[in-house]
Each structure stands twice: as C-alpha cells, then as structure tokens.
Image: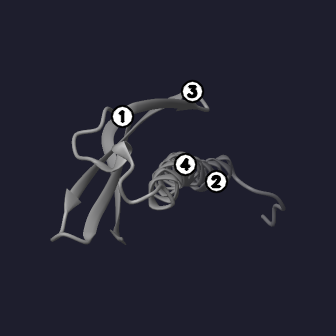
Amino acid sequence: MNQKGFSLIEVLVGLVVIAFGVLSIAGMQLVSIKGNHFSSGLTQATTLTQNKLEELKYLPYDDPKLSSGQPSQEVTQSGVVYTVQYDVAPLGNTMKKITATTRWTDRTDHTVTLSTIRSM
C-alpha cells in the first residue's frame, strides 16, 4: 500500500525536536537578559566612579576634600543603589593618589575601582 502523509510517530518526533529548539532559545534569551542587566550596571558604576575622579582631580591641591577618610555617597539610578566613595593617600610631598570605588548589588556584590595620581 502506498500511503501519503506522516504517521503519528513522525509528527510527535518532529514536535519534540521543535520543543527542544524553542527551549534552548528561551534559555539563551535569559542568559542574554542577565548579561545586559549586568553590563548596564557596570557601565553606570564606571561612569559614576569616573565622574568622582574627574571632580576631585580638578580641585585645588590643598582642598579639604583631598584629605583621607571621606564619607561615601549613595546614588540611585534605574532602581539600583550605587555607593561611591573615595580615598586620598599622599605619595611624598607633592603627589596624592586618589582612588574612587563604586559598589552595587544585584543578586551579588559588585565593585568598580579607578585610581589617578594628582601632583601639585
């Protein structure tokens, strides 16, 4: 007998293959969303850290803000709280090392640290 068409088994195997394909694409989509969320937070933290360094770098050398032990500052952007703090360490009599650090939490703790050296 020569019958045309697909058997029930062939259709079920085809559906299983398609289901696995769709589930793997959904998994990749979740990983992509998480990666984009982390990248956004990292970009924002790096920008905040760089802005703090730029602000401090252009202050007069003897400005009180360029002494060690400064309080932290909290910035909320896109629902995420970033804590920006900085430290100033003298390097001899004519230079200071300024280190700015930004911390934030989204599922885990993250930190971005940038440094520069300021001379008289």
Q: Report, in whole angstroms, how far the alpha carbon at label 2 lies from the one at label 1.
A: 33 Å
| Camera-nearest label, 1 or 3 | 3
Q: Which image quadrant: the N terminus?
A: bottom right
* Disc on the earlier residue, 3 or 2: 2
Query: Measured from the top left, where is residue 7 in percent x and y?
Result: 69, 52
Quarter occupied by residue 10: bottom right
Asked whether 74 or 65 is in front, the reply is 65
Element under label 4?
helix
Q: Which residue is mark 1?
A: 107
Q: Is residue 5 visible?
A: yes
Q: Report, in whole angstroms, how far the alpha carbon at label 1 lies from the one at label 4.
A: 17 Å
Residue at x-position 59% and y-position 50% = 29
Asked whether 27 or 54 is in front, the reply is 54
* Disc on the earlier residue, 1 or 3: 3
Q: Which residue is mark 2?
A: 18
Tell me: 74 left or right of 5. Answer: left
Quarter occupied by residue 70: top left
Q: Report, in whole angstroms, how far the alpha carbon at label 3 lies from the one at label 2.
A: 38 Å
Residue at x-position 81% and y-position 66% = 2
Query: Measured from the top left, where is residue 36 in percent x and y?
Result: 57, 51
Disc number placed over residue 79 in the picture, else none: 3
Q: Amino acid at mark 4?
A: Gln
Q: Which image quadrant: the C terminus?
A: bottom left
Q: Report, in whole angstroms, how far the alpha carbon at label 2 lies from the one at label 4.
A: 39 Å
Query: Measured from the top left, where is residue 12 in percent x and y?
Result: 62, 47
Q: Which residue is mark 4?
A: 44
